Image (tube, helix red, strand yellow):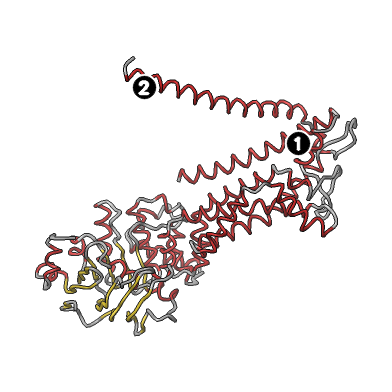
Amino acid sequence: MATIVNVPEEKILHVNHFEFTYAGSDTPNIKTLSMPIAKNCITALIGPSGCGKTTLLRAFNRMHDLYPGNTYAGEILFEGRNILDTKEDLIALRSKIGMIFQKPTAFPMSIFDNVAYGLRLQGIKNRSEVSDRVEKALKDAAIWKEVNSRLKHDANGLSGGQQQRLCIARAIAVEPEILLFDEPTSALDPISTQGIEILVSELKERVSIVIVTHNMQQAARVSDYTGFMYLGELIELGRTEELFVTPKEKLTEEYITGKFG
Amino acid sequence: MTHTQKRIMTNNIVMVLSTLSALLGLGFLFWILGVLVFNGIEALNMNIFIYEGAPAGYEESGLKQALVGQLLIVLYATAVGVPLGVLSGTYLSEYGQSSKLSEVIRDISDIMMSAPSIVIGAFVYAIIVIPMGHFSGYAGAAALAIIMVPIILRTTDDMLQLVPSTLREAAFALGAPKYKVIIQVVYRGAKAGILTGILLAIARVAGETAPLLFTSFNDNFMNTDMNEAMASLTVTMYNYATSPYEDWQRLGWAAAFILSMFILGLNIIGRLFLLRKRGQ
């Protein structure tokens, strides 16, 4: 069982005996994992490649359902429901739990339309409301100054870092409860990375954030809580400064001191 | 002779041989185009666009019926072939993916793409022309549509698969239902490629003669009724070019020239789309 220490009372997600198996795999890729995700905090998931951190993240918005044959077991509680329920409305779920990917995923349309996309999906048609919320989202994502003169331009003309902030603007425009970040800076240069990290820290006042990262310094810099995963299991979860300074588990210590991974 | 000298000599021989064969191929191409342009332009005049076919020796004869017939047949074929091809390509890439059924459809469409077009003409003759009892523009359009579908299906399938799956995931992650992801995001990403595939498929069928010979047949006079036999540039060209009359042969050259320019134009536009896409 994982060592879980000092997690606050208020939780946004509760993972309970969760198990996940990819199509064609004989054994579960994530084994009976339980962990709380704190509300309005940043939780980082770290661990060596293949430890299942991205797999776990992609279960939170049921991304695995896009590909046939993947199976879940156990429960993930969100707003009092088990989101793994087969009757769960995935469209509604995903508009409450947004996701930012490793590589920027700007849609082949204008900057404005990219951010308006989620709003229009929710049926918001009023032009002035759409443009107000697009502006607000772009400001919140700290990219408004760079793009306000060229909102009608193709989003693919932006730099990688700008595109990633555009994707964040697109995700926060629909005011989700949770944002999932899947290694959001691994394709970016150091300056863009810093910009994204500052942005993520500012966002936690409004949304709960789970971030998967390969970069332990990044986890230490931005997160409030850190979970260390290894071979499909959660080894340790605790306050970030405690986990990095005084890890309770030997495996955690070996990983953060660079003995493996 | 040293080893190095030998290598340089072999290199030079191979280079000269390959350059010569390239020039030979290009030489024939420009010879064909040259003869076509020379005879075609000479035969072009306003009468061609104003008058219908007429017996040999008449001053007032033209290709109006063939131009209109060709356009109508290709238009109807496009109206049927494009939606069928794009939708089935969409099924393969977005719904069937790598299922058994999709793989079988892909293989069959590859076979259909290389099927001799005269076989497709014979097929349409058997299932449309014989039951209806007469040749018709519809039968011609059906034959061309059948030739178009596998081409458009494959390019659509390929172009949609080139759209990165993370783009689809990003749209799903915003709460988009599948049909909206396909129409609003995936199609947009593959627009230039699909459009190019469509243009090239139109260019391909516009040059077909064999499947029209026994479906839409021919008509020397103006006809816009798709339910009747109908003239086309290709069949008209075949008839006129093999006739013994010099003025009919000239009309044949004019038809060849107009058709080639049309197909060349479609090809150039198609390539421009792709270039612009790559430039982004």
Helix, strand or loop at label 2? It is: helix
Snapshot quadrant of residue B55: top right
Tell me the residue at 55%/41% (across/down): B271
Residue A155 place in picture, x, y as percent:
42, 54
Figure check: A220 above or below A71: above
Report which residue position mark 2 lands on.
B7
Q: Marks 1 and 2: in contact by CB < 8 Å?
A: no
Report which residue position mark 1 lands on.
B255
The residue lying furthest to the bottom in this view is A80
Along the horizontal axis of the image, is B107 left or right of A150? right
Along the horizontal axis of the image, is A256 left or right of B81? left
**Chain letter for the residue marked with disc 2 in the picture:** B
Along the horizontal axis of the image, is A148 left or right of B50? left
Tell me the residue at 88%/31% (across/down): B59
Amino acid bearing label 1: Ala
Snapshot quadrant of residue B49: top right
Amino acid bearing label 2: Arg
Along the horizontal axis of the image, is B37 left or right of A51? right
* Label 2 vs 1, first from the N-terminus: 2
The residue lying furthest to the top in this view is B1
Q: Nearer the viewer, mark 2 or mark 1?
A: 2
Between A234 and A155, the one nearer to me in the picture: A234
The residues tagged by marks 2 and 1 sit, at their Cα atoms, a distance apart of 52 Å
**Chain letter for the residue marked with disc 1 in the picture:** B
